[in-house]
Image (tube, grey):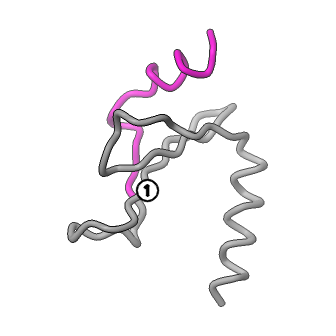
Amino acid sequence: MNIEEAVRAVPESAWHKSSYSSCAGGECVEVATDATAVHIRDSKDITQSTLTTSPAAWAAFIGFAITQAS
């Protein structure tokens, strides 16, 4: 199974929209996680490519983003 097949295998119910996203447009991100990967997509156009990363890389990104926001 390649990355593209794995992303297609993510059920729609697994995707969670960012609490910072609004219904007014703009930056909308959805994330789906499993034991081996974190999938990130643009919620405004879910037909576009999905970014897939390791849980460790995602945790490092979130940690960095939190420190930059404060």
Mark 1 packing: few (<14 Cα in 10 Å), some, or many (20+)?
A: some
- The part of the chain drawn in magenta is 1-17
Horizontal side, residue 6 vs residue 23: left or right: right
Instruction: Name the quadrant of the N terminus.
Output: top right
Q: Residue at x 59, y 34 (%)?
A: 34
15 magenta-colored: yes
Say left or right for 49 vs 21.
right
The answer to which quarter of the image holds residue 17 is: bottom left
- Residue 36's x, y, as percent? 69, 31
Which residue type does callout 1 highlight? Answer: Val
Q: Quadrant of residue 33?
A: top right
From what the image shows, is residue 40 above or below residue 61?
A: above
Name, please, the residue furthest toward the bottom: 70
Residue shown at the point (26%, 66%) measured from the top left: 25
Q: Residue 68: which quarter of the image?
A: bottom right
Asked which secondary structure carries label 1, the reply is strand
Residue furthest out toward the left: 24
Q: Is residue 54 magenta?
A: no
Q: Which residue is mark 1?
A: 29
Tell me where residue 12 appears, x and y as whole percent: 33, 33
Horizontal and vertical percent position of residue 47:
35, 33
